[in-house]
Image: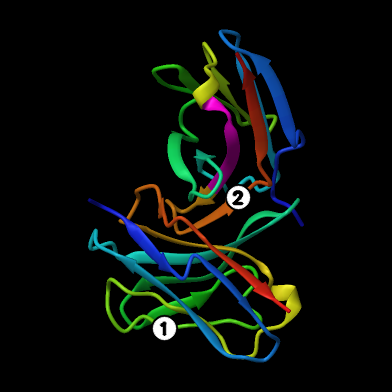
Amino acid sequence: EAQVTQNPRYLITVTGKKLTVTCSQNMNHEYMSWYRQDPGLGLRQIYYSMNVEVTDKGDVPEGYKVSRKEKRNFPLILESPSPNQTSLYFCASRQFNQPQHFGDGTRLSIL
Amino acid sequence: DQQVKQNSPSLSVQEGRISILNCDYTNSMFDYFLWYKKYPAEGPTFLISISSIKDKNEDGRFTVFLNKSAKHLSLHIVPSQPGDSAVYFCAASERGYQKVTFGTGTKLQVIP
């Protein structure tokens, strides 16, 4: 089954404790993105990647890092999480000129 | 600066009637528009799209209309069904999907 898999689905952690949210897709898609969803703000892009070792900032990249060492994986790294990064995060992938496929989301709470 | 706006946070419609969800955009460089549907605890799923060279695209019960002069698009669902109850996101992109900008979403409730 074609899918985008995010882990963990839920995480409660504390300020400053590094965390990684993993994202994996099995569709051989070139493009991958990370979004965060906040009330009243919709989905905002954090980072995106057009291929292996090619990443770029989206609209709200501050406080986040990403890497794309393999085509299927695109982890989101929070080196020093802060409470304003409490949000619902979505990973997405797509093939060129096709709509995005989204994962089921990761709800992060940073205390 | 919100380039894609959905001014109605919520909408309630009776089953069998038409649902109309609206979206406005400000960036005249947008040339592709999409609608996504999102159920609770799931990621958004693609619903329907339209290119700026068209003014209408239809897929079953779903039709998207684009008015370029007004920078406005709408999604019509006819007839509405309870399973259509979800949050609908409007999205727009330029240069063929290179960057997608999403609206804030409209929560549709279809009442049986």
Q: Look at the magenta stretch and give its main secondary structure.
A: strand
Dots 1 and 2 on the same chain: no
> Quick check: B98 above or below B6?
below
| A40 part of magenta stretch | no
- At horizontal 27% and vertical 79% (from top left) the residue drawn is A70
Using the rendered image of the protein, determine whether residue B72 is visible from the camera's viewpoint: no
Which residue is identified by label 2?
B102
Residue bounds of the magenta highlight: B84-92
- Identity of the amino acid at label 1? Ser
Image mark 2: chain: B
Residue A22 image position (x, y, % from top left): 42, 75
Is A109 left, or right, of A93 in this rendering?
right
Which residue is identified by label 1?
A67
Tell me, for residue A8, which label it has, or none.
none
> Quick check: B55 above or below A95?
above
Label 1: state its secondary structure.
loop
Image mark 1: chain: A
Residue B24 image position (x, y, % from top left): 69, 37
> What color scheme is it?
rainbow
Quarter where residue A23 is shown: bottom left
Residue A84 image position (x, y, % from top left): 75, 74
- At horizontal 22% and vertical 51% (from top left) the residue drawn is A1
- Identity of the amino acid at label 2? Phe
Is A86 left, or right, of A102 in this rendering?
right
- At horizontal 39% and vertical 47% (from top left) the residue drawn is A99
Q: Residues within 10 Å of mark 2 (few under 14, many from 20)?
A: many
Task: Quarter of the image for the C terminus of chain A: give it.
Answer: bottom right
